[in-house]
Amino acid sequence: MAVASLALYGMFVMTQTVRHRDFFLPMSEGGRVLPEEDHATRPTNKRTLRSLGLLVASLVAVVGLAKIESEPIEQGVRGLGLPQAVVGVVIALLVLLPESIAAVNAALRDRTQISLNLGLGSAMASIGLTIPSIAVASIWLDGPLDLGLEPTHMVLLALTAVISVLTVVPGRATRLQGGVHLVVLASYLVLSIQP
């Protein structure tokens, strides 16, 4: 599972940054890609490797922080009488907070495609990097490694995949499609709190 997740993430990053970079660039109201000067310049190989090193260091810090913070979060969830699955949701929300803020800011600037790209990239990073990290960490950490989903969450995952394909394939996202993603997210949160 860890190798498959990492491979999918690697393919996504290559698609987003090299092979089909234009799919992920902002578009004008008329549907054309905005000029290159409106974007950040492409990073050098040295800067890319430095960013990769910082990403790995950050990932180790995030996994360690999740381990440290999981006990107080578990106590809070138990105190509120919520299911154990809510612990993972809270930790995921904390980890994904920076991307979520950036996605909301992009949406407020009427850059829906960028907002959805941030969400998709964040999801791919969560799956593609967190699962391998947790799998490796589970060698040294106590407790079982459970990557399974309940049937309800499998349906929501399949629904999310179909909606994502319908959103990304046409090459242009709309507010309606973003709204559908938010409704599925809200459904997931409600079903995690009250299964």
Image (cartoon, grey):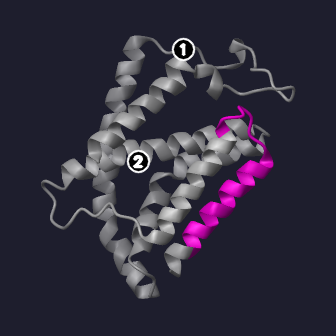
Rendered view: 135 above or below 36:
below
Q: Nearer the viewer, residue 72 or 84?
A: 84
Q: Main secondary structure of the magenta part?
A: helix
**Residue at coordinates 69% horizontally, 44% vertically from top-left?**
105
Span colored in magenta: 168-190
Kind of residue at disc 1: Arg
Q: Helix or strand or loop: what does disc 1 sit on?
A: loop
Q: CA distance from mark 2 to mark 1?
A: 25 Å
31 lies left or right of 7: right
User: Where is 195 relative to 27, above or below?
Assistant: below
Indicate left or right for 43 with 141 as reference: right
Q: Position of residue 177 (x, y in %)?
A: 74, 49
Query: Which labelled disc corresponds to residue 56?
Result: none
Q: Which residue is mark 2?
A: 127
Task: Name the foreground residue: 139 vs 75.
Answer: 139
Residue 179 spot, x, y in % from top left: 74, 55
Q: Which residue is mark 1?
A: 42
Residue 129 percent location from the top left of the image:
35, 42
- Asked if residue 113 lies in the magenta stretch, the reply is no
